[in-house]
Image: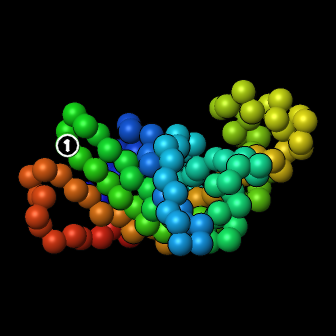
Amino acid sequence: MTKEEIFQFIKENPLCFLATVEGDTPHVRAMGTFKVDDRGILIQLSTPKDLYKQLVKNPKVELCYNNLATGTMIRIGGTAEFLPDKAVKEEVLVARPFLKSLADEQGLDVIQVFRVANGKATVWTKAENMAPKTYIDL
């Protein structure tokens, strides 16, 4: 797969499982990808959540996207790079209006967005189950 094909796969399968580490304990949770564009893979979260605190301490992440119908899984490792741009947070509020009351109560900075910087993807399919991994720079 190419970078463009991976981004299209994510657009078609926006739910990912996001892994972080706190101390020596791994944590994984399902996340909806906010956007995939020329900035990369963007994930939105809120500062009161443990996820935010974990990423501030250790920004290394792995995302896993899956399409059960095709038997394709894409894992992406990289570093969470927060985007401080007010405009991207306002994009979030347009796309996810349920967050508006949180932003009204706690201020716009309660909304955080990170991109996966230095991303490297590996694609897995049933047909290539035992093949050596190859990595695609994102």
Q: Nearer the viewer, residue 5 or 48?
A: 48
Q: Quarter-wise, where is residue 13 in the image?
A: top left
Q: Nearer the viewer, residue 14 or 88?
A: 14
Residue 22 percent across, percent down from the top left: 59, 67
Tell me how many marks there are: 1
Q: Nearer the viewer, residue 78 or 19?
A: 19
Q: Residues within 10 Å of mark 1 (few under 14, many from 20)?
A: few
User: Could one spot residue 4 in this view of the protein?
Assistant: no
* Circle 1 SS class: loop
Quadrant for the N terminus in the image: bottom left
Q: Is residue 26 left or right of residue 94?
A: left
- Colour pattern: rainbow
Residue 12 percent across, percent down from the top left: 38, 37
Amino acid at pointer 1:
Gly
User: Could one spot residue 46 in this view of the protein?
Assistant: yes
Residue 68 percent across, percent down from the top left: 25, 37
Residue visible at 57% across and 52% down?
42
Q: Is residue 6 left or right of residue 58?
A: left
Quadrant for the C terminus in the image: bottom left
Relative to 132, say whether 69 is above or below.
Answer: above
Residue visible at 39% across and 68% down?
120
Residue annotated with mark 1: 71
Residue visible at 12% across and 67% down?
131
Residue 87 percent across, percent down from the top left: 77, 47
Q: Quarter-wise, where is residue 132 in the image?
A: bottom left
Residue visible at 49% across and 53% down?
28
Q: Nearer the viewer, residue 68 or 21?
A: 21
Relative to 36, say whether 12 is above or below.
Answer: above
Q: Is residue 40 left or right of residue 90?
A: left
